[in-house]
Structures are given as structure tokens and as C-alpha cells.
Image: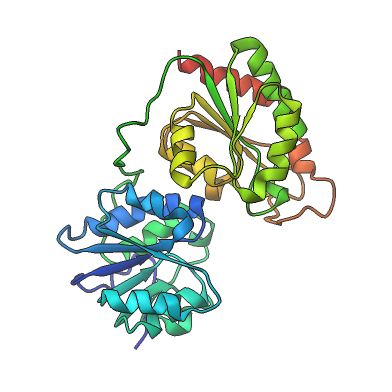
Amino acid sequence: MQKDVKKHHRDFEPLSGPLLIRSPNWLGDAVMSMPAVKGIKEIDRSISLVVATPRKISYLWSLCPFVDEVLEIEHSKNIFENVKKLRKKKMDRAILFTRSVRTALECKLAGIPKIIGFGRTDQSFFLDKRVLLSQDLETLHQSQIYIRLAQSLGAKKDTYSYPFLKLPAQWKKTPQPIIVSVCPGAEYGPAKRWFPSSFAWVCQRLKEKYGCHIQILGGEKDKTVCSELEQAVQEAENLAGRTTLAEFMERIYSSHLLLCNDSGAMHVGSLLNTPTIAIFGSTDPRRTAPIGGCFRVIYEKVQCSPCFLRRCPIDMPCMRAVKPQDVLHVCEELLSLGG
């Protein structure tokens, strides 16, 4: 029988047996879910915690000391490939940080006895326990929404922050040269992307003042905008589509500054405590801004923002309102803090 869990209502049973955490599919969302997942582990550290995650972001979870096992899954047309992997683990309970029908159905077909996730979603039918958020909670920061899920299981209500990670010993931060990582892409859609020409103007001014090395980072889908930026910035190193997630994270870790849009890169920079400047346009920083580290958000609210659209139907007034000179000033401020 399904149960509704409302705000401040503790309706949970003691955790037991191996526990499956179904990670969010997006890199940024996965980072924002980490404090909540750590909170679940701290309910009972003796419980084995297995994180099921898309292969493309599995490295992120491998760095977490509170995760006992990382199970890579694929988004293929045949869901039974994932069902088979899940069934082999013989999990007692699954906690879904996703909201899709597919992830809940995979757990149900895998025979997991108890499946817990967010109510009022497409997956609700397959859940054994629904965590309902009241309307005021729906406007919370995404990390806090994940934390509400953890608290429904008995996690403490202490202030949550990013966990310590098991970073490779070979990752280094060096004083010189100054390295500025730039991520002009955003996988969600072009409405979240500041203009390559504006990024280029800022990068060129930074090179002239600091003699810094500009490295351009992004995934396969970011190649076009990254190429535009490379052509406009002298001696920039373009690594778009050429790094693994481990290499991508190492590059950001070793940087003195990260300049990006509201994207997965932004959350990685915050997680790794790299000074980060995030430019917001169509989305709302109250809901998805970084939650830790040294960061600055640049956001010029206009009449139609936040719209949360993938593509702007007009001329992107929110992004046009962000002036390169203002971004440069914030870059200089953060670089000065680093000594």
C-alpha cells in the first residue's frame, strides 16, 4: 500500500539490507543530490549503499567515500538490460532521485521490494512510498528538495554541505600559470548559454592582464560553441569532446577560475572549491545555484525570466542584459582573492 509523506511527517521504517540509490541523470543534478545521499548513509553507516547511475557520470560517484558500490546503467531502448543488472544486486529498497517512469519501472521489474520516490510525478504508480512536497517546497533549491527525500527516511535535519571526496593524489593546483577554464555550453539548451563572443571578449581581456592560459571545456554537444570561442581567443586550448569526466574534473580542479553558464560544470567547480562564476539566463539561481565553495552568480532578471525554456523564442534578452564588462570585473575580483 502506498504512503504519502508530507512536510514534517516522519513516516519511515528503520533502514536495513543493501540500499539502492538511483542517481539523477544529469551531472549538475547528481552533484546537488550528493549531500542528501550522504545524509542517507549517515542514518546507518553499516548499510551497504549502491548508487545506480548513468555511465557518463559514474566517475563522480566513485569519488564518494560514503558510496560502497557504483552500478553503471545505460539509457538504451531495451530496459531489461538495466533490470537484469538491478536484479542481480538483490536490493531491499530503492530510493529514486529521478522522477521518470522508466527508472521506477526498472526497479519494479527487478523485484526490489520497496521503492521510494517523489509523489505527484509520472512514476508515482510504481512507488511503494511517495514523498510529497507541498507547493511552497516546490520552489526550494533543488538540493533541498533532495534533502527532503533523505529526511523522509530518517536523515538528520542538520545543515547539509558537499561531502569530502577521495580525489586522486596526482591532481594538483599550481600557482603559475594562471589557468582559466571556460565552459560556454549547456546541455539543456541554447537558452542557458551566454554568447561565445561575450565569453571571448572576457577571455581576451584576462589574457592581456594576467597572461593566463585559457582552456575551453565541454562535451560532444558543446563542440560548436567551443569552436567559436577558440577561434576568437588567441592560443586558447579547446578540449571540448576530448576529455573523460575524470579529466574534465581534474582540469576544473587545477584551474584558478571557472567561467561558465548554469550547467553541470558550474556544480563541479563548486564541488571542487574552484572559484566559479556562473551566468544565469533562462533559469532561476534560487533553485539551481551552486551550494558551496567560492562562487559568484551573475543574473540580470528581465520581464520574461525565468522561463526555463530550452530555446528562446525571441532574442535572449536575459543573456543580452549580462554585460561582458561586468563579468570581467567579477573575474578580476575572484582572481585577486586567490592572491
Rendered location of residue 226, percent (x, y): 68, 38
Give the camera-side residue of 94 and 50.
Answer: 50
- Quadrant in which the C terminus appears: top left
**Residue 330 higher or lower than 76, as above or below:** above
**Residue 87 higher or lower than 61, as above or below:** below
At x 18%, y 71%, the residue is 16
Q: Left or right: where does residue 335 sit relative to residue 206?
A: left
Residue at the farthest right position: 314
At x 41%, y 62%, the residue is 53
At x 68%, y 47%, the residue is 192
Q: Left or right: where does residue 149 sit relative to residue 205?
A: left
Colouring convention used in this rendered image of the protein = rainbow
Rendered location of residue 122, percent (x, y): 54, 78
Residue at the farthest front position: 242
**Residue 327 higher or lower than 263, as above or below:** above
Give the camera-side residue of 92 and 168.
Answer: 168
Residue at the farthest bottom position: 1
Rendered location of residue 27, percent (x, y): 49, 52
- Quadrant in which the N terminus appears: bottom left
Q: Quadrant of residue 127?
A: bottom left
At x 58%, y 46%, the residue is 263
Q: Quadrant of residue 316?
A: top right
Rendered location of residue 218, percent (x, y): 60, 42
Give the camera-side residue of 141 and 309.
Answer: 309
**Does any portion of residue 301 appear in the rendered image?**
no
Residue at the farthest left position: 46
Number of numbered discs overlaid on the protein picture: 0
**Does any portion of residue 223 appear in the rendered image?**
yes
Q: Left or right: where does residue 297 sit relative to residue 245?
A: right
